[in-house]
Image (spheres, helix red, strand yellow):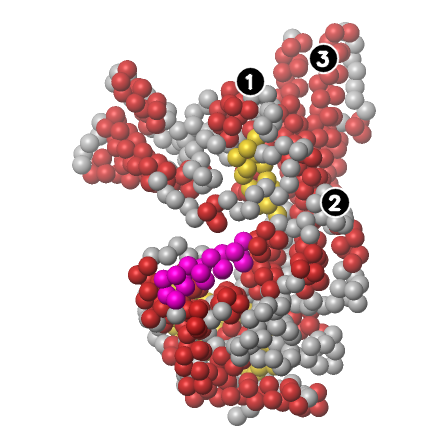
Amino acid sequence: MSSVSCGSDLLTGTEKQKMDKYERFEKWLLDNHSEFSALELRAYDDNVNNTNQIERNSIDVITEEKKEMNSSAPDNSNANNNDFFENERESEMRGVHSKIDIPPNTICVSIPKKCLITVEMGQATDIGQIILKSDLDLDAPKHIFLMIFLLYDRKVNGDKSFFKPYYDILPKTLSNIPIFWSQEELKYLDGSYLLAQIADRNEAITEDYYSICEVAPELASIATLEEFKWARMCVCSRNFGLQIDGHRTSALVPHADMLNHHRPRETKWTYDDDLGAFTITTLQRISRGSQVFDSYGQKCNHRFLLNYGFAVEDNRELDGFCPNEVPIELGVLPNDPIHEAKYEFWTRGENEGSSAQLNNSISAAVAAAAVGAARSQQQLNPAMTIHSMMQAAASAVDVASNTTVGKRHLHGRGTRFQSMGSEQSLDAVRRIRVCVSNNENTRVLFSMLRVLACNEEELCTVSSSASLPFGDSSCPVYLNRALRGFTSSHSASNSASMQQMAFFRTARDIRHPIGLRNEKAAMEHLLKVINSHLDLYPCSLAKDITDLMDEDKYPRFSNRRHAKIQVRGEKEVLHHFVLWAQTAIDLINIIEKEVTIIKESSNNNSRQEVDTQQRFEYITQAMERDEGMGSDGLHHTIIRYCCDVLGALRQEALKVARRGIA
């Protein structure tokens, strides 16, 4: 049977040859009891702007192609020295389309287990066994074993391999994936943090290759470094995380891995133990001829581009949320007047940058477990209960402090820019990935900014205020006191011992403003950091937007265009925080003016007023009225911060000023 349709009048001789390759692949699957009769594979011409070939709505989403938009081999000396890569130039753009109307809740793809390549199959090879026994510290262990099987089976079994029809349709090159980009193409990412990630990815793959070659020299006879990189990115862009017979694994799933990305998702996939097969089920009606999509999840464009080789033009969810992120780097300036004290607090509770791991490991669950254990043993003495909890917490600290993190995950490639236009380097740099949202990372960012903006008095206040790594409002009084270092016996030795284990705030925990002065200084610091970040790019956001309108200079589906989309997304996030910081500063200036007028009115025994349109309340009420009125208005996260956070600061500042008068 032929289940491939691309329009016979559009096919060249090369394309017909390719269809034969697809047909052999489909026949192999069908012979092994796969089922996808409602679907067909389509290969697209390189010039996909030809709307006569594919309907327009499909073209709009093919930009989200995950893996196969290439036409030339990577520029490397090894590619021409072996037959691993074919030399013919062929379009690798393809997708899966429905041949009929498919109702929702229909299994449209079923691939039996025997056609899957799993982690365990790679582990069972000779090289896989050596890797398992060597206990190597590899960048992506599960990927490695899939890669090993892919490379080993292709090379050793060749045409006799059971998976030969599948290997034949894998992309011969992956020139759309950034680790294979030319230096000229990488220049389109100038200023982007993605350049460091690309370099890190290349370095990690190279380290893995040579590490494996040291313990299993036969790998070098099976694959060159370039082939190893090709296998890594094939696996990275195609593997599925599955649970098969109750066991978590990863697998390459022929046919299923050809579905391109689209959100919101239209299908769902799983491994069905009863059927003994990987299945894809429709979530909605899919009309005849439409492309059938998978969703690769809600991701930042940098992950799509780094791992799959595309960037989504409008990467937004149905509710308008955009998951695009950018890392912001913060650290203590060496010339800070209170550098030593601030550095101590900045690094408090951190083990080589893994504060989140440490803080999260000492949670309410520890206390609950200890209390439960004590009660089960009928040890109701509060001091005994707390002592048990403290021992558990101390054990968690020991575990965290003895954990070694691989250097590539820990350090990255150094700071991307000098702080605030200064030539000074930052101490103890922390990177916080933020998007246009008031999520946990944004709250951590603001917390750390408040710490960096502290003067001596403010730092003393926040750093000496004991707090718990979990909410304590519902704790019994004795538990609350004991967690802060006090015991029922009040003995000096017990008190000293418990005080050493008391939990104090870290730089991540200042979730509420310290004061008006500090909040303004924090926003000014943020503004300087963001502007320094924006200075790294060779052109403005406005220029990026204009460039993307020019499809001749930035052709659809080209690496150049995807780079431009990535960089534009980064700048959009940065500009959001510029607007946030500047708006906050402007409003704090108004609050300060209102406070000054109250104080001056008291001194002069006269009543002065701020111009109505310059009053905080007037401005914030206008913000709230305009909220959601259009894309040109302030984002709701900025409005809520101004109305709620700055509003509370204003109330406190005015109250203090009036109290001074009284």
Q: Amino acid at mark 2?
A: Gly
Q: Amino acid at mark 1?
A: Glu
Give the residue drawn at x 69%, y 35%.
421
Report the disc number at residue 599: 3
Residue 22 visible in image: yes
In the rendered image, the vertical position of residue 122 relative to residue 210, given as above or below: below
Q: Main secondary structure of the magenta part?
A: helix
Q: What is the x, y in percent for residue 479? A: 32, 28
Q: Quadrant of residue 349?
A: top left
| SS for callout 2 | loop
Report how far apart the C-alphas of labels 1 and 2 lie in the structure. 38 Å
Residue 644 visible in image: no
Report the disc number at residue 457: 1
Answer left or right for 316 relative to 31. right
Q: Earlier in the sequence, mark 2 or mark 3?
A: 3
Badge 2, how many Cα within 10 Å: few under 14, some, many 20+? Answer: few
Q: Which residue is mark 2?
A: 633
Report how far apart the C-alphas of labels 1 and 3 lie in the structure. 23 Å
> Farthest residue in the bottom direction?
1
